[in-house]
Image (tube, rainbow, N blue to C red):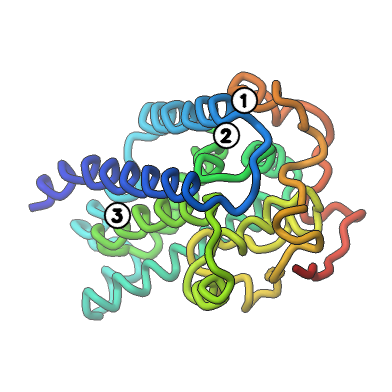
Amino acid sequence: MTDTFLAAEPLIRLSAFLSVLVAMVLWEVAAPRRRQEIPRVIRWSNNLAFVVIDTVILRLSLPILAVGLAVIAEDRGWGLFNALDVPVWFAALASILLLDLAIYLQHVMFHAVPGLWRLHRMHHADLDFDATTGLRFHPVEILLSMVIKLAVVAALGPPAFAVLLFEVILNATSLFNHANIDLPRPIDRLLRWIVVTPDMHRVHHSIDPRETNSNYGFNLPWWDRLLGTYIDQPAKGHREMEIGIEQFRTTRDLWADRMLIQPFRGPASGHALDPRITTKDGAD
């Protein structure tokens, strides 16, 4: 049973990823929220290249990933939920919520620590905002993120199917909340109580550092509201706000080779603990 589950994992991931990506791209073409300034061929080809780069480096660097570790933890009784006598459904639901909280806290950390911000800012340096933005992460950040996730999985001992479900949902919502889609405002206001919407997450990609360091959630929106990092709307509105960060504003900076060396270029300004940044809400 376990071997069958692990064998099916790549197909499940790939099917979900391609389905959501194609759906978001078609939606973006049919109903875009913002006018895009950079030719898609430049951004899409380089952003999508990081799906391959990150996957290859991750598979070559780590002997086991999150779902595999969850299987081992179940077999050997490691972790909190393998030590507690709780129903599987409770362990699965609690694991998904706690994994999502861990991703939120990790995201905050990558904005707060200057050295980690140097890695993460590559994601923010995109000059437009669409579903492919949710795919461009520096491979070193991907490796560090997986190490953190492995530590959380080892501590929690979650059901393996819950870890796979969480990762599939997280990848899907990352594509969704980075998509350049025009959701009707009443639907957006309702949806953002249960999932991070594109309008909610787009604030996080504002060039204004006060807005960049807000709305950290990728999947569930509750952590931002509960922990005081939520901003409802960007100060300039969604159509006028600038996307990206101040340091990397040229089309050449969108190429994969430049993105890979971004951590070594310029100061680590704009991180959450930068003393020049103050917090204030925006208005639509």
Q: Is residue 132 visible?
A: yes
Q: Classify the position of the C terminus by image quarter.
A: bottom right
Q: Is residue 150 visible?
A: no
Disc 3 on helix, strand or loop? helix
The reply to whether callout 3 and callout 1 are in contact (CB within 8 Å) is: no
Residue 118, above or below 215 = above
Disc 1 on helix, strand or loop? helix
Q: CA distance from mark 2 to mark 3?
A: 22 Å
Using residue 3 as the reference point, say whether residue 259 is left or right of it. right
Disc 2 on helix, strand or loop? loop
Residue 36 found in image quarter:
top right
Residue farthest left in this picture: 1
Of 234 and 280, nearer the camera is: 234
Residue farthest front in this picture: 30
The reply to whether callout 1 and callout 2 are in contact (CB within 8 Å) is: yes
Residue 97 in picture, x, y percent from top left = 42, 70
Label 2 is placed on what type of residue?
A: His
Where is mark 2, residue-wise?
138
Look at 29% across and 54% down and name the residue there. Answer: 164
The image's mark for residue 164 is 3
The image's mark for residue 260 is 1
Label 3 is placed on what type of residue?
A: Leu
Q: Compare marks 1 and 2 and give the one earlier in the sequence.
A: 2
Of 4 and 209, nearer the camera is: 209
Using residue 53 as the reference point, say whether residue 237 is left or right of it. right
Look at 65% across and 36% down and name the residue there. Answer: 122
Residue 261 found in image quarter:
top right
Q: Compare marks 2 and 3 and give the one earlier in the sequence.
A: 2
Look at 29% across and 62% down and name the residue there. Answer: 162
